[in-house]
Image (cartoon, grey):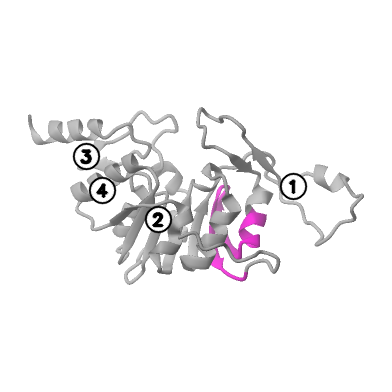
């Protein structure tokens, strides 16, 4: 078996892959139902991440097969840590990083355990995770409390209207009409499955994504693509309690 055939065999044995990586000329998911994912999506917002990340630490939460971790290393990031709660994805990520020759630290860990890292990172990537969580606001609170040092690159699937209404700080108890206004923050709960995935629990509209980020203490600095935000760590909502110690 030649080298390429052996690589193809190893990639197939680790499948199925959700990230279509290019490992020494071999694609890991060339028939992905979304196309060349996540490369095609990254192309729309990569400009908000500095080209030169030398000296920066990066945490990639829900790293999957490591596409974004690898991209951060290509931008010369210093320490890159990728975490995921799925052992199969971590095996893929470790394999890809080894084959490509990048030094990335991968850990089997859920977002609810980030306190254990005992470190704040210059850049946190939280891409495509929130809607898979039973406790999305808790996750955002934990990130703010424990690991986001400066900036976070955030992506969440959205459904519903794209408008974001200008809202008052308070409304009368009997003003029920506000909840029907287009652009009011709404989060749709999926009891069973969406797109065949039983972990698609909460799917917000655009207004809800932005409101949840602000409530958790993040300041929106850029929105280069509908679902993607670059946010900065700010001050949490005054009524938002500090998250519990889960370790």
Quote the CA–CA distance across marks 1 and 3: 45 Å
Quote the CA–CA distance across marks 1 and 2: 30 Å
In which quadrant of the rendered view does residue 232 lie? bottom right
Q: Position of residue 43 (x, y in %)?
A: 43, 48
> For the view shown, which residue lies furthest in the right direction?
174
Query: In the rendered structure, does residue 85 fall within the stretch colored magenta?
Result: no
Mark 2 falls on what kind of element?
A: strand
Between residue 148 and residue 199, name the one nearer to us. 199
Q: Are marks 3 and 2 in contact (CB under 8 Å)?
A: no
Query: Is 155 left or right of 4, judged from the image as shown?
Result: right
Residue matched to label 2: 60
Mark 4 falls on what kind of element?
A: helix
Quote the CA–CA distance across marks 4 and 1: 42 Å
Q: Are marks 3 and 4 in contact (CB under 8 Å)?
A: no
Between residue 186 and residue 136, name the one nearer to us. 136
Q: Residues within 10 Å of mark 3 (few under 14, many from 20)?
A: few
N-term-proximal mark, 4 vs 1: 4
Residue matched to label 1: 183
Q: Does residue 223 show up? A: no
In percent of the image, x 37 and y 45: which residue is there? 64
Quick one: quadrant of the N terminus? top left
In percent of the image, x 29 and y 32: which residue is there? 15
Mark 3 falls on what kind of element?
A: loop
Residue matched to label 4: 94
Q: Which residues are magenta?
A: 210-235
Q: Nearer the viewer, mark 3 or mark 4?
A: 4
Quote the CA–CA distance across marks 4 and 2: 14 Å
N-term-proximal mark, 1 vs 2: 2
Q: Residues within 10 Å of mark 4 (few under 14, many from 20)?
A: many
Query: In the rendered structure, does residue 222 fall within the stretch colored magenta?
Result: yes
């Amino acid at each position: 078996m030649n080298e390429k055939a052996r690589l193809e065999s190893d990639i197939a044995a680790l499948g199925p892959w959700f990230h279509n990586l290019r490992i020494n000329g071999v694609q890991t998911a060339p028939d992905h139902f979304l196309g060349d994912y996540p490369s095609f999506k990254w192309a729309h917002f990569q400009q908000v991440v500095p080209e030169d990340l030398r000296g920066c630490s990066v945490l990639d939460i829900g790293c999957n097969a490591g596409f974004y971790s690898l991209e951060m290393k290509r931008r010369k990031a210093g320490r890159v840590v990728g975490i995921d709660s799925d052992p199969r994805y971590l095996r893929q990520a470790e394999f890809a990083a080894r084959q490509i020759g990048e030094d990335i630290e991968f850990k089997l860990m859920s977002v609810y355990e980030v306190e254990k890292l005992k470190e704040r990172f210059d850049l946190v990537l939280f891409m495509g995770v929130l809607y898979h969580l039973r406790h999305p606001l808790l996750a955002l609170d934990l990130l703010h409390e424990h690991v986001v040092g400066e900036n976070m690159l955030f992506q969440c699937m959205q459904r519903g209207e794209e408008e974001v209404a200008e809202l008052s700080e308070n409304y009368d108890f009997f003003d029920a009409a506000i909840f029907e206004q287009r652009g009011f923050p709404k989060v749709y709960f999926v009891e069973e499955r969406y797109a065949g995935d039983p972990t698609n629990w909460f799917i917000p509209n655009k207004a809800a994504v932005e409101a949840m980020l602000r409530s958790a203490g993040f300041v929106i600095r850029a929105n280069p693509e509908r679902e993607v935000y670059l946010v900065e760590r700010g001050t949490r909502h005054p009524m938002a309690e500090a998250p519990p110690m889960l370790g």
